Amino acid sequence: MTETWTQAVRRQLDLGRLLPLGGPHDGTWITEQAAVQALGRAAAEVPGVRLESLRIGSAPLQPVSEPAVRPPASALPPGPLTIEAAFTASLVRPLPETVDELRSTLLGAATEQLGLATVTADMRVTDLREVPEAGITSRTAATAMRPTPEAAAARSSPPMTGTGSMRGLVRELADVATGVTGVARLTAVLGSRPVRVEDHDDPPDRHVEVHLAVGPGHHPLKVARAVREAVAEAATADTPGPATVAVLITETAAWRRTSPATVTSAPQ
């Protein structure tokens, strides 16, 4: 039992922080692991850079907001975020240019590809190299943050709804969520079912929490908004009170817009 508990704690730590996506009324969060992997793919396009570490958290001394819906356990409140990146740089180009490009790339990817409310990106150069290493760019995304074995296995398998063992209302809401365009599958990374339903009597209301993976070519925040709308409508069918929905995104292929001004990401 101790080993099982240890593995569960390790999986939770691998996910990192639960970051707010969008604004207070969007009711959506994304795991730091998923966000870092997306930003790592974007950073791989910056020449002469190899990320050593990448973290995302609440920006210090910045105001936060109360979320419109009940957040997942231990999730950060909606508010500005900051990116902390440590990296190795090549001296083939001026260092200030490299730092500026990496900073703008990370901020652009966080805002446009994911929907994170990032305001700052702190850059730390850990080493300088006279000559670029062979393959330095291609290793950036892979080393930024490796997925857990469970996440890797999920990505290598065909998309599944994961609703086979669910019953009743939970099964119905899971089917609604997986039917939304852009949802690759439901996930259960926090040690429980991917769809949770809580009913309360005083006052009467219902809260639903959905954990999911976003498929390639879809913007995570737009998918989450569509899921929340569809699930909320279905969840109010048999309850006298309102229904609220929170979404936690655990994987994303990082949507990108085709535009010269937009940061692109390496294929997954």
Image (cartoon, helix red, strand yellow):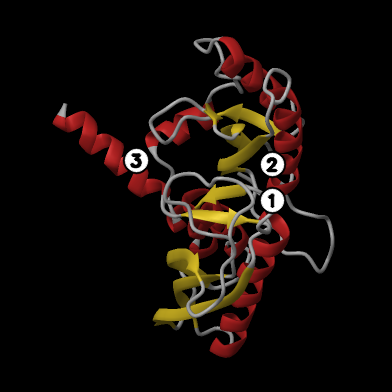
**Is residue 217 visible from the viewing direction of this image?**
no
The amino acid type found where label 2 is placed reads: Ala
Vertical order, 121 against 5 (above or below): below
Vertical order, 62 against 206 (above or below): below
Query: Cβ–Cβ below 8 Å for labels 2 and 1?
Result: yes
Query: Cβ–Cβ below 8 Å for labels 1 and 3?
Result: no
Disc marking residue 11 = 3
**Is residue 71 visible from the viewing direction of this image?**
yes
Residue drawn where x is 64% and y is 48% of the image:
27
As helix, strand or loop, the secondary structure at mark 3 comes to helix
Quadrant assignment for the N terminus: top left
As helix, strand or loop, the secondary structure at mark 1 comes to loop
Cα separation between marks 2 and 1: 8 Å
The amino acid type found where label 3 is placed reads: Arg
Query: In the figure, is residue 262 to the left or right of 150?
Result: right
**Image x and y of residue 179, in percent:** 73, 23
Mark 2 or mark 3: which comes first in sequence? 3
Q: Nearer the viewer, mark 2 or mark 3?
A: 2
The amino acid type found where label 1 is placed reads: Asp
**Image x and y of residue 75, in percent:** 47, 52
Query: Cβ–Cβ below 8 Å for labels 2 and 3?
Result: no
**Image x and y of residue 57, in percent:** 48, 65
Disc marking residue 224 = 2
Q: Quadrant of residue 124?
A: bottom left
